[in-house]
Amino acid sequence: MKPALKPNSPNFSSGPCAKRPGYSVTALPTDTLGRSHRSALGKSRLLRSITETHRMLGLPEGYRVAIVPASDTGAFEMAMWSMLGARPVDVFTWESFGEGWATDITKQLKLADARLFSAPYGQLPDLSQANPAHDIVFAWNGTTSGVMVPNGDWISDQREGLTLCDATSAVFAMDIPWSKIDVATFSWQKALGGEAAHGMLVLSPRAVQRLETYKPPWPLPKIFRMTKGGKLLEEIFEAATINTPSMLANEDYLDALAWAQSIGGMKELIRRSQANLALFEAFVARHDWIRFLAQDKTIRSNTSVCLSLDLSADQVKKLVKLLETEGAALDCGSYKDAPAGLRFWCGATVQPEDIERMLPWLEWAYGQVKAA
């Protein structure tokens, strides 16, 4: 039967992700609007985003954080173009975004000493192939495949190379061992539901040393430059951004950070995301027509839930459209490069009751499409 209840928030997009419960744009401070981001007021608010990020994530002493242009993509490109080439590099990919980084490394930077380790959607490559003498490039969570690395045990504590981690759909939802990570990037519009266009760059002391001792053989655009005269531009990591940021988007991010702190910080963010995943797991266990792309539970993402169904690609499109038309689930189709299926964000900003109300609609919509 057609369900009666609908989610209060049917927003299940994997980016931009759902806003926090109780969010209202009218509650954001507006005193920074129309002011220079380089004013004392503007800079203090940007610095708060940096320091609160550092504290919330529990970053080790000496790690630096910067707000940079062009979302997670810009932050990761910035890191690759500035640091890679000093050593051979091992690239691990298992979905479209990781494949994009591999394309940059092999076809744009044209690094000769690059080894690619790939796996199909739903699986992980052999991470034990990582050479501690090489740089390592990988995404902690494959947003388009629903597959994450289970831990950081495969990364050597005695490594000579750097680890460059695209962590945009993992931060604020997964337990990342920061001592294993030299470069991490993410964006505001992911795990805490912030606004788009800004990236966050996290550097370890080892990454800073690379920047100060290695000069890549290719020219760097202005928005990629983090050193001057062989020294790190410390002001970038002290809220003097490379280009003009949106102060409204910054206030939105600060609002999300404050909410995360109010509910219990990282531990509670992770717990909520894992509890949301458990609701999907229980649903899949009860139905034989739907399954996770990541069949191995140990590598299954607790943010981007990717599912395949006993339907053709055209039928899946009809199901997604039906859920949207009914206002039961929005933006839940799989990524354009991924196998036909569904993708639901289940990070901490998604309320469990919204998932519980959506799942009967998913079952109903499947029945409608299958019978058509």
Image (tube, rainbow, N blue to C red):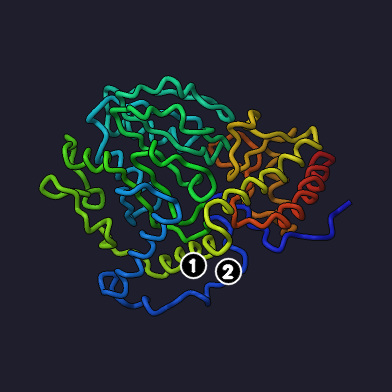
Q: As drawn, which residue projects farthest toward the front?
A: 61
Q: Residue at x 43, y 23 (%)?
A: 117
Contact (Cβ within 8 Å) of mark 1 with mark 2? yes
Q: Which amino acid is tagged 2?
A: Tyr
Q: Quadrant of residue 328?
A: bottom right
Instruction: Decide which of 225, 230 is in the foreground and name it.
Output: 230
Point out residue 262 in the picture as x, y percentages from the top left corner. 55, 64
Q: Residue at x 25, y 27 (%)?
A: 87
Point out residue 138 in the picture as x, y percentages from the top left corner. 42, 34
Point out residue 294 in the picture as x, y percentages from the top left corner. 62, 32
Q: Which residue is mark 2?
A: 23
Q: Local crowd at mark 1 within 10 Å, few (<14), some, or many (≥20)?
A: many
Residue 79 lies left or right of residue 348; in this view the side is left
Residue 128 lies left or right of residue 8; in this view the side is left
Position of residue 169 relative to residue 88, above or below, is: below
Instruction: Decide which of 303, 15 is in the foreground and name it.
Output: 303
Q: Which residue is mark 1?
A: 255
Q: Local crowd at mark 2 within 10 Å, few (<14), some, or many (≥20)?
A: some
Q: Quadrant of residue 92?
A: top left
Between marks 1 and 2 in the image, the one whose residue lies nearer the viewer: 1
Q: Which amino acid is tagged 1?
A: Asp
Numbered circle sitting on residue 371: none
Q: Residue at x 81, y 39 (%)?
A: 370
